[in-house]
Amino acid sequence: MTGKNNQNYNEEYLNYVKEIAPKTKHLKTLWHAFWVGGVICLIGQFIRYSFMYWFNLYGDQLAGATSMVLIFLASFLTGIGVYDRIGKYAGGGSIVPITGFANSIVSPAMEFKSEGYIYGLAAKMFVIAGPIIVFGVIGSVCTGLIYYILNLFSLI
């Protein structure tokens, strides 16, 4: 096959894909992501204010308690299959808050549970979230080293 014929096949294929691919409604998709992400954050604020009022929590305790409740809710909703439907509807609006991170850990754990607790659940739990954790740790270590070096030079 010559290069010219190969290019024609590629163009034909791209035209075919363009014809059958569903058209994305960008504004509608953005609106769904915006309001669902906003509602998730609104629920988080409600939980935060509730902990402040009912349990008199402040600072790190308040942040930790709010995060734990949001993670629990997202994990529970993932377990019963509701969070996946929210994700289909909202797209990026459901994955940006901490609830999306909880979903990215629970979903593979549920999917691979049938392979056993060690080789399935424990090994595959961080398939999606693992790179985020690794690069987050590496990024924070590099940032800390940069601050340390800058602080060292300012002391000299």
Image: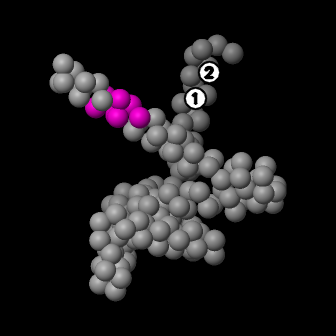
Task: Give left or right: position of 63 versus 18.
Answer: left
Task: Give left or right: position of 33 versus 12.
Answer: left
**SS at badge 1:** helix
* Residue 28 vertical placement versus 112 (above, below): below
Q: For the view shown, which residue lies furthest in the top direction? A: 2
Residue bounds of the magenta highlight: 141-147
Residue placed at 37% from the left, 68% from the top? Answer: 61
Residue for badge 2:
6
Residue for badge 1:
10
CB under 8 Å between callouts 1 and 2?
A: yes
Quarter of the image with the C terminus is top left
Where in the figure is residue 87, as x and y percent of width and height?
51, 65
- Res. 110 mark: none
Where in the figure is residue 132, as x and y percent of width and height?
50, 44
Question: Is residue 86 visible in the rendered structure shown here?
Answer: no
| 85 in the magenta segment | no
Question: Is residue 26 visible in the rendered structure shown here?
Answer: yes
- Looking at the rendered structure, the kind of residue marked 1 is Asn
